[in-house]
């Protein structure tokens, strides 16, 4: 694997997600479900350290910067609860967006153990011998 491919590898051992809301906002956050302890039914969702993602003005080289803005700058609390009715989709972020967000979480005092969970493996750490078609 080349160094560039290694750097852009998408990590999945975390709960960082881009949540698209019915308001058309795209929110980058630590995302999780709120479940009833007895029934395990999902009652809502939690967004921790949420940032709204927007595209900046296109630069001369054709790139589009991504802006990060606090979801609710009017509150000191960084945990927001929402219902599923307000969610359109939930996806993993791009590797570079993820890396930038992890830096922001570390600046806020979070440790890697709070961001990542151990990756599960099937015991075979070798590379596949051929690409899937």
Image: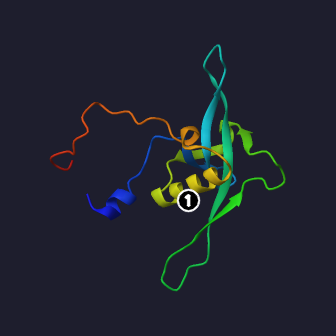
Q: Position of residue 15 (x, y in %)?
A: 54, 41
Find disc 1 in the rendering and name its residue: 100
Extreme residue toward the bottom, this view: 60
Q: Quadrant of residue 120?
A: top left
Measuring 62% from the left and 32% from the top, which residue is drawn there? Answer: 33
Please rate how many residues cluster around mark 1, counting C-alpha atoms within 10 Å: few if below 14, some from 14 to 19, many from 20.
few
Say if 59 sits above or below 3 in the image: below
Extreme residue toward the top, this view: 38
Q: Position of residue 113 (x, y in %)?
A: 54, 38
Which structural element holds mark 1?
A: helix
The answer to whether residue 3 is left or right of residue 103 is left
Say if 104 sits above or below 62 in the image: above
Measuring 80% from the left and 56% from the top, which residue is drawn there? Answer: 73
Looking at the picture, tell me which residue is in the foreground, 29 or 22. Answer: 29
Say if 1 sits above or below 37 in the image: below
Please indicate, yes or no, whether residue 106 appears anywhere in the rendered image. Answer: yes
Please indicate, yes or no, whether residue 27 appears anywhere in the rendered image. Answer: no
Q: Position of residue 127 (x, y in %)?
A: 22, 45
The answer to whether residue 5 is left or right of residue 10 is left
């Amino acid at each position: 694997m080349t160094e560039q491919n290694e750097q852009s590898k998408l990590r999945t051992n975390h709960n960082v997600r881009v949540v698209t809301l019915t308001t058309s906002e795209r929110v980058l956050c630590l995302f999780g479900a709120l479940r009833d302890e007895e029934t395990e039914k999902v009652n809502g969702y939690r967004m921790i350290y949420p940032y709204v993602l927007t595209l900046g003005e296109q630069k001369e080289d054709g790139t589009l910067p991504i802006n990060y803005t606090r979801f609710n700058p009017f509150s000191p609390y960084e945990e927001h609860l929402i219902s599923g009715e307000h969610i359109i989709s939930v996806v993993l972020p791009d590797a570079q967006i993820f890396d930038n967000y992890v830096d922001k979480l570390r600046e806020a005092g979070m440790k890697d153990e709070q961001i990542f969970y151990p990756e599960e493996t099937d015991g075979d750490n070798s590379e596949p011998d051929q690409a899937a078609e």
